[in-house]
Amino acid sequence: MSRAKPDLGREGLDRFVDAAPQPERSGLRLLVALERRPRGRRMLSRAPVVDQLANGLLAMGHYEDPANALALGWDADAIAARGRALRREEGRL
């Protein structure tokens, strides 16, 4: 029995997809819908390039949760602090 993937970052991913222009928005919605379902994932596995795209798209949603982002090596606060320090150093306040 296949287990469904968690919907981590669903709200942010939905905002990302909604911001895409048509017809890309429809394609992204289709990929996300298929990737979130066991039967859809099996179907996507027959097209490795499309499967990789769908996996990457859902992985982006994981960055919405700060705890997941840190585990993946993304620390938004540290990146923002480095950017502010660099702007101060260069006099671009």
Image: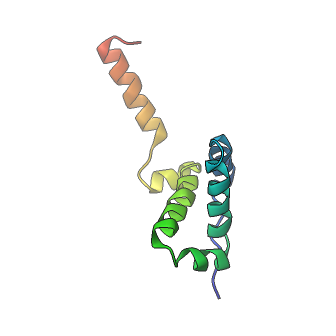
Residue 35 x, y percent position in the rendering: 62, 68
Rendered location of residue 17, percent (x, y)? 64, 48
- Location of residue 90 by image quarter: top left
Left or right of 86? Residue 29 is right
The residue lying at 60 percent from left, 78 percent from top is 43
- Which residue, as the protein is rendered here, is positioned at the far left? 90
Counting every numbered tag in the picture gives 0
Which residue of the protein is positioned furthest toward the bottom in this rendering?
A: 1
Closer to the camera, 69 or 40?
A: 40
Q: How is the image coloured?
A: rainbow
Q: Residue at x 42, y 29 (%)?
A: 81
Q: Quadrant of residue 93?
A: top left
Position of 88 relative to 77 (above/below):
above
Looking at the picture, tell me which residue is in the foreground, 20 or 63. 20
Question: Is 85 situated above or below 4?
Answer: above
Position of 3 with respect to 91 (left or right) is right
Q: Quadrant of residue 4?
A: bottom right
Q: Image point 68% across, 53% down: which residue?
A: 26
x, y (%) of residue 37?
Answer: 67, 73
In the displayed structure, 86 sits above or below 67; it is above
- Closest to the observer, 49 or 70: 49
Residue drawn at (65%, 88%), measured in percent from left and top? 1
